[in-house]
Amino acid sequence: MNRIQYILKKNTPFIAIILITGIIASFMEGLTWGFFIPLLEGIRGETASGVPFPLNQISHIFVDMDLKQRILLTACFIVLFTALKVTFVFTSNLFTLKLQMRVVKHYRMLCFDQLIKVGMQYIHSQKNAHLQTIAIIHTREIARLVKEIGLLTPKVFTIFVLLVLLTLISWKLTLVSMILVTLASLVLHKVVKNAGKRGKSLSEKDKSINSTVLDFLIGMKVIRIFGQQERMRTLFEREVDHHNKNAYRLVKTESSVQPFFETTGVLCLAVLLIAGSFIIMQNEAAGLEIVLTFIVIFFRILSPFQTINRARVSIAGYLPFYREVYRFLETHDKPYIKSGHRTFRSFNKAIEFINVNFAYNTRDSFVLRDISFQIPKNKKVALVGPSGSGKSTITELLLQFYYPKDGIITVDGIDLKEFDLMQWRRKIGVVSQDIFLFNDTVSHNIKFAKPEAAEREVEWAARLAHAHEFIIKLNDGYNTLIGDRGVLLSGGQRQRIAIARSILTKPELFIFDEATSALDSDSEKIVHQALHEISQGRTVLIIAHRLSTISDSDIVIVMNKGRIIEQGDPKKLLEKEDSVYRRLIKTQNLDIVAI
């Protein structure tokens, strides 16, 4: 409700214009049909004394006019008022469209902001395609909901004005006709309810079909390697069929309104003709004009009634999309990482983990248990151990994607949570095995970490990352487009661009998370050389399976099953016969002396 109030307040000028133009258009509509009475009077050649106020005032304009003059003046007034009406309706529709675009932008930005602020555990618990569907497709359906509501405005006022006219002409006939129309609207209640169900099913199928397409695009290589193209095609076809089935049902439900109301209109006409015949028999002098004008206006009022009831069905169909977006925007059921207020510029001593325990969800067991270690300033600390031992989780805690469940992480003795989050993250350079590059130029990918960087800074970072040599050999050098996720580059080239991107910000702490594990031996040597050079005199945390990449580390921390089982100077650890680190070195057939 607060969001709706905010939208109403923010778009008050647009809403006011829609309302005003709708009212004026409705008034013009009423005047148009009000001029039929004096025209019919002219045809009969006598004045209908039974015409009520203020409709009888229109008749005074035509006093002493013959039939030809009445027809000419009536035609002019009808054309004038109709032109004014359609002008105001057009204006109302234009501002409804503007309001529609503003609302869809508002909700899309809210969804995007939610994605930016929400904790990583929520993102990881959802399908990317579902989040994309909510942010793009479902917000588009909200725009359609706004359109339906906006287009209703002139219709509602038109019904009000015409109802007043009908009541003035004959309250008895109005009562009869409104009873019939109300009964028809009540019958549509079940149709509206069904539309809500169809809309909910359609919103789910939107997410499903989007998920299938995204999985296909991301997993294209795997799908082709295993020859599963036909299986994916069959799956996609099934999703499309389900989506079309639900879309067809929703449209069919909406389309049923028109024939239903046309049938109702014919029924009403029959009843009104019968009722009108009694009025004519009771008061023949005034009855014909009244009945004919009433029937003409009544049939004009059926169209907006039909539009409103069709809109009821449409709105019921689109509401599930709004509810889906609203649930996504709720904050009470989602985790958020909050930024501290302390300014962070640099650290002087060490980053320290003190008795840290962590689990990704409350239902899960701890993936880190009683973790305590230091990353001293300008030292290289290596985390080693088997997969699943919790090494990468430590990186995620350092980046504050998550908070420890117990214990604390400090920087120079100050709780990490007290520092401004953006300032802290800007001082960290991360190079991991899973490199993400944008479908953009080499230069823009490097500058992503620092958009305002000059070209000379980009080249400096590229040279330090041993990337400049291959970049200048590309077709357009630094302006070469590298494809989605950098697909046009080799693994080693992508890794070096990622290193250059991290170097550009001159971070306080470098984190190398399995940065060379997926590379061939030649690429590994180049990347390892780059990492070695940029590590000199810097604070570095390196996570590795290949122990040859940590030969120059100052501190080695051995992890297993979420615990630190050994840590210290690598040379001293190697000297111990029962050292786990020494055993790992032997397992990988490395030369202990060289290490």
Image (cartoon, grey):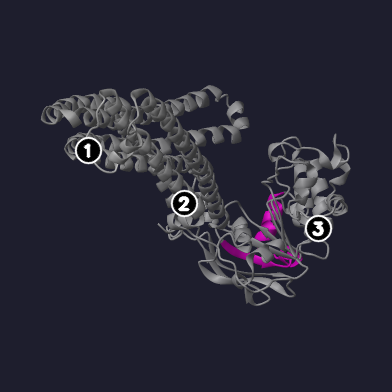
Secondary structure state at the residue bearing disc 3: loop
Q: Given the current orientation, which residue lies at the most extreme front position?
A: 64
Residue 440, horizontal then vertical, whole percent: 74, 41
Which secondary structure lies at badge 2? helix
Q: Which residue is mark 3?
A: 593
Q: Which residues are magenta?
A: 563-588
Left or right: residue 445 compared with residue 300: right
Closer to the observer: label 1 or label 3? 1
Q: Residue at x 27, y 32 (%)?
A: 298
Point 23% across, 35% down: residue: 181
Name the residue carrying label 1.
Answer: 182
Q: Which numbered dot is residue 16?
A: 2
Quarter the N terminus occupies = bottom left
Counting the numbered discs, the total is 3
What x and y, as percent, mark residue 508? 75, 65
* Res. 569 image quadrant: bottom right
x and y, in percent, of residue 425 in the image? 67, 62
User: Which of marks 3 and 1 precedes in the sequence?
Assistant: 1
Disc 2 crowd, CA 10 A, few/some/many (<14, 14-19, 20+): few
Residue 197, can we see it?
no
Asked whether 541 falls inside the magenta stretch, the response is: no
Q: Nearer the viewer, mark 3 or mark 2?
A: 2
